[in-house]
Image (spheres, helix red, strand yellow):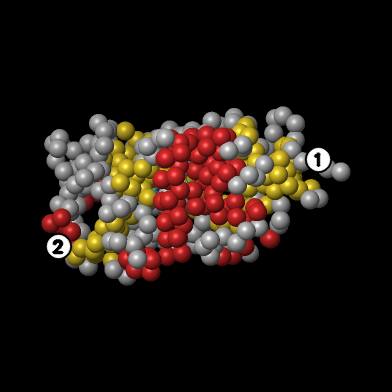
Amino acid sequence: MTRWDAETAVVGLGAWGASALWRLASRGVDVIGFERFAPGHALGSSHGHARVLRLACPQHPGLVPLAQRSRELWSEMEDTGQERLLVVCGALTVGTENGPLAGGALRAARAHGVRVRTFSASALRFQYPRHTGVPHRHIGVYEPSAALIRPERAVRTAVALAEEAGARVLADCRVTRVEPVPGGVRLYTAQRPVRVRQVVLTAGAWLTGFLPELPLETVRRPLAWFRPYEPDSGFGPEEFPAFARELEDGRVLWGNGAEGGDGVELGLDDAGVAAKPVDPEDTDRSVTSQDWSEPARILPVRLPGLRPRPTRVALSTRTRTPDGRFLLGRPGGDARLVVAGGENGYGFALAPAIGEALADVVRGDAPATGLGFLSPDRFR
Ligand SMILES: Cc1cc2nc3c(=O)[nH]c(=O)nc-3n(C[C@H](O)[C@H](O)[C@H](O)COP(=O)(O)OP(=O)(O)OC[C@H]3O[C@@H](n4cnc5c(N)ncnc54)[C@H](O)[C@@H]3O)c2cc1C
C-alpha cells in the first residue's frame, strides 16, 4: 500500500500559495508547502512596497465577492499574526464610462453595492489637481475603502500562520518535477521524492514548467519612483490616492502616493519593449533606461509636478492569459491536481480568498463564489 508523505502539497509560496497553505492548514488538512526561494522574496510577483486592494474590481464583477472575502481574511490575518498589513488610502480609477477600467469599476460597484464616488473629468481636475490631461469624456471612480497591502510582510505572515496551524514548509526547496501516479502525485526535489494525494500548483510565472499546455505568457513589469519637484506638493497618499488611469492610446498608467523619500511609485502597462515576454527561469532583474523612459516621457503632461528622472527602478514579472482572467481549478478535471495562476495586476489583494477557494477545491467543498469563469479548461 502506498504511504503518503502528506495529504496535499502546495508548490510555490508567493501570495497565492502561502494563502492556500494557510487556509488548508487551518482546516486541518495535512499539508506541506514548497518554495524554491525564501518566502517573501523579490523574484516572483508578490513583493515590493505595496499592492492595492480594491473591492470594485474592474476586471470582472465576479471577482468582487473574492475581494470582499479577502478583505475579511486580511483583517483576520492582521489580528492573528499581529502585523500591520493594510493601510486604508482610497483608490481612484480613471477612464471612459463604458471602458474596461473606470467603467469596469463602476459596473462591479453597482453589481455588488460597493460604495464609490464618481467624478466628471472637470470635477476630477478640481478634486485631484495633480492629475492633468484627463480627457473630457473620462470619469473618475473613487473607492474610499481601498487599501494598500504590504506584500512581503503579508506573504511571510500567511506562511507563519500556516505553520502555526500545522503546515510543514520547505523553503529554498525547488520542485523539479510533478509526476502523477495512481491515486496521487510524486514530487521531485533535490532531496528524496515526496508523495502526496493532491498537489496545488501556485508557481506563478514558473507554472508552465509543470504544465506547458497552459496558455501563459510572462512579461517584465518595471516600476519606477519619481520624486516631486517641491516637497509637500500634494503627492502624499491622502491627497493623491492609489490610482489606475486609462490613457487615450489604451495603456494604463498606475501608481501610489509618495510614502517615503523615493517619491511616487508608477508603472505603465504594456509599455513597448519594457513589457517584452521573458523566460521566468532567467532571474536577471537588471533594468535599463527603456524600463522607465516611457512613463518619464508622459509625466510632464499627466503628472507635471514630478521630476522625470526616477529615484529608483525595480523589476518584477507578471504572467498573463489570453483573455486577461487568471486560472483556478483542476485542469482536465484531474482529481490529483489543482492550479492557480496567470494573474495580471490585481491578484495580490484577492490572495486570501483564492487560498480559501483552492482549499475548497482540494477538499471537494463547493466554493462560496461561482468561479467557473476562471476554469483552466476554458482555452482547450
Ligand atoms: C509590479 C506589480 C504590481 C502589482 N500591483 C498589484 C496591485 O496593486 N494589487 C493587486 O491585487 N495585485 C497586484 N499585482 C499582482 C499580484 O502581485 C500578483 O497577482 C500576485 O502576487 C501573484 O502571486 P502568485 O503567488 O501567483 O505568484 P508569485 O508571487 O510569483 O509566486 C509564485 C511562487 O512560486 C515559487 N516557485 C516557482 N517555481 C517553483 C518550484 N519549482 N518549486 C518551488 N517553488 C516554486 C516562486 O519562487 C514564487 O515564490 C501586481 C503585480 C506586479 C508584478
Picture layout, residue 38 above or below residue 276:
above
The yes-or-no answer for disc 2 within 8 Å of ligand 1 is no
Horizontal side of 18 relative to 303 (left or right) equals: right
Q: Type of residue at label 2?
A: Ser
Q: Quadrant of residue 232?
A: top left
Q: Residues within 10 Å of mark 1 (few under 14, many from 20)?
A: few
Numbered badge on residue 3: 1
Horizontal side of 49 relative to 217 (left or right) equals: left
Lower position in the chain sequence, tag 1 or tag 2: 1
Q: Which of the image's four quarters has the N terminus?
A: top right
Picture layout, residue 333 above or below residue 28:
below
Q: Residues within 10 Å of mark 2 (few under 14, many from 20)?
A: some
Picture coordinates of residue 83, whole percent (x, y): 40, 35
Is residue 126 shown to the viewer in this render? yes
- Between 344 and 145, the one lying in front of the other is 145
Query: From the viewer's perspective, is the residue at label 1 or at label 2 nearer?
Result: 1
Horizontal side of 64 relative to 267 (left or right) equals: right
Q: Which residue is depicted at the point 42% across and 60% down?
A: 64
- The image shows a total of numbered marks equal to 2
Q: Which of the image's four quarters has the C terminus?
A: bottom right
Kindly identify which residue carries mark 2: 122
Horizontal side of 184 relative to 330 (left or right) equals: right
Is residue 277 shown to the viewer in this render? no
Q: Secondary structure at mark 1?
A: loop
The yes-or-no answer for disc 1 within 8 Å of ligand 1 is no
Q: Which residue is depicted at the point 65% across and 38% down?
A: 32
Q: Type of residue at label 1?
A: Arg
Q: Secondary structure at mark 2?
A: helix
Picture coordinates of residue 189, whole percent (x, y): 69, 34
- Between 37 and 313, the one lying in front of the other is 37
Picture coordinates of residue 330, whole percent (x, y): 65, 57
